[in-house]
Amino acid sequence: MNQYMSDSGFIDINPREVILDPAMQGRDTNLIRDKNTRRAQELKQESQSKEILDDLHNGVGIKQPITVFEVSGKKLVIDGFHRISASLEYMDKAKCDDFRVKARLIRNRTYTEAFLAAQEVNQGHGVGVTKDEVNQSKFRSLVIAGKYDYSVSELTKLIGCSRGQANHVMRALRACAEAIQGELEDYSSLDSFTRQLQKNLENRYTEAAKSSTWDARGFPKIRRLSDIVSGKSYTPKDMDNEEYRHYLIEEAYTKIDSLIESVGEDNFREALRKTARGSTLGISITRRDKWLEQAGTLESDEAPDNWDGVSIPDSSYDAF
C-alpha cells in the first residue's frame, strides 16, 4: 500500500466512527476443505479476539494501528477487523464512549481501491490464513480489477501456484470476463457487482446455480467455476470430509426443490408427512386440514400443467 503514502496520516479515532464492511475481509474459513483445519482456524480467531479484549480490560490498549480508507466520506476498515470488533465490545461493556485507537487514515480513495487494498493486506497476514483463502482472495482482486487476460505462466508466478491450479484460475477468469460488463465503479456497490456476475454466470451455466459455487463474498470459487466451464460434474473425492457432506446436502436440496415444483407444495408436503411418520428423521408435520386452516385457506396448490389427475407428474428425477 506504499502508493497511498502521500494521502495518509495518523489520527486517533473512535471505533464507532469506522465501518466494518464484510467485503473487506480476506478471511473465509468456508474455503478450508478439511473440517479439523477449518475449526482450528476459527478457534485461533476467537482466541485472538479474546486476547485483544483482555488487553483492553487490563488497560493495555490497542498495540498496532489499524488502517482506514476514506471512501466518499465513509471510513472503511482495511486492516484491523479483530481490533475494532474487540474495541467495540470493550466500549459496550465498560460503558466507555471516549475510547480511541490509533489509525492510519488514507483519504480520497475509491471503493475499488479499498477492496483491492483489503485483499492484499489480508493475504499477507492474519490468523493462519490458508493457501486456499489466499488464492481465492487474489482471484477476487483480479476480477474486481478487470485483469482477465493472464496466461498460465503469468498466473503461476502472480498467484504462486502450480500450473494445474493456474489453468483453473485462467479458465475461471475468462468465464467472469464473458459474464460481467464494466468495472466495480459502474455499480452502486460490491453487492450489485457480484449479484450481476452471479446472475450472468448462472444464465450461461446451469450448474452455477448451486450455492456451493460461491464464496462468502459472492465470488465464484475458482475450481468450481473452472469445472463448470469445462463441463465436468463436480463430486468431492474425499467422502469423509465436510465438503462432501455439503455436496450431498446441495444435491438433495436441488432434487427436493425440483420435486416440489413438479408436484406442488401441497402434494409434496403430504407425501413428506407420510414419509416422516414412523421414520427416524425427527420431523413432525401437521395434518393437511390443520395446515390449510392455519394458512387461512381450504384450497390446495394448483395442479401442475397438463396433469391428468391420476398419474404422477413428470420430474427430472426418476426417484428421490
Image (spheres, grey):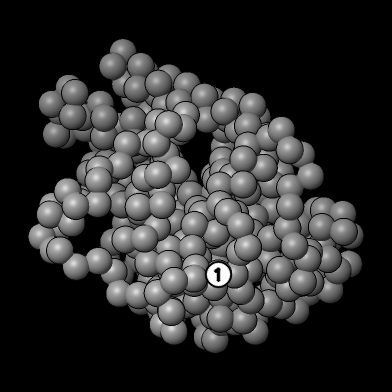
Residue 170 image offset from top left, x and y in percent? 77, 70
Residue 271 image offset from top left, x and y in percent? 41, 52
In this rendering, position of residue 21 left or right of residue 40 = left
Residue shown at 13%/52% (left/top)?
294
Quadrant (top left, top right, bottom left, bottom right) of the C terminus: bottom right
Residue shown at 19%/23% (left/top)?
93
Q: Above or below — where is 203 with respect to 279?
A: below
In this rendering, position of residue 167 left or right of residue 251 = right
Give 305 or 182, whichever is nearer the viewer: 305
Query: Which residue is farthest top?
Result: 58
Residue shown at 49%/68% (left/top)?
312
Q: Quadrant of residue 51?
A: top left
Q: Quadrant of residue 306?
A: bottom left
Label 1 sits on residue: 315
Query: Which residue is farthest front?
Result: 310
Residue 121 image offset from top left, x and y in percent? 57, 49
Quadrant (top left, top right, bottom left, bottom right) of the N terminus: bottom right
Q: Above or below — where is 155 with respect to 151?
A: above
SS state under label 1: loop
Residue shown at 69%/47% (left/top)?
132
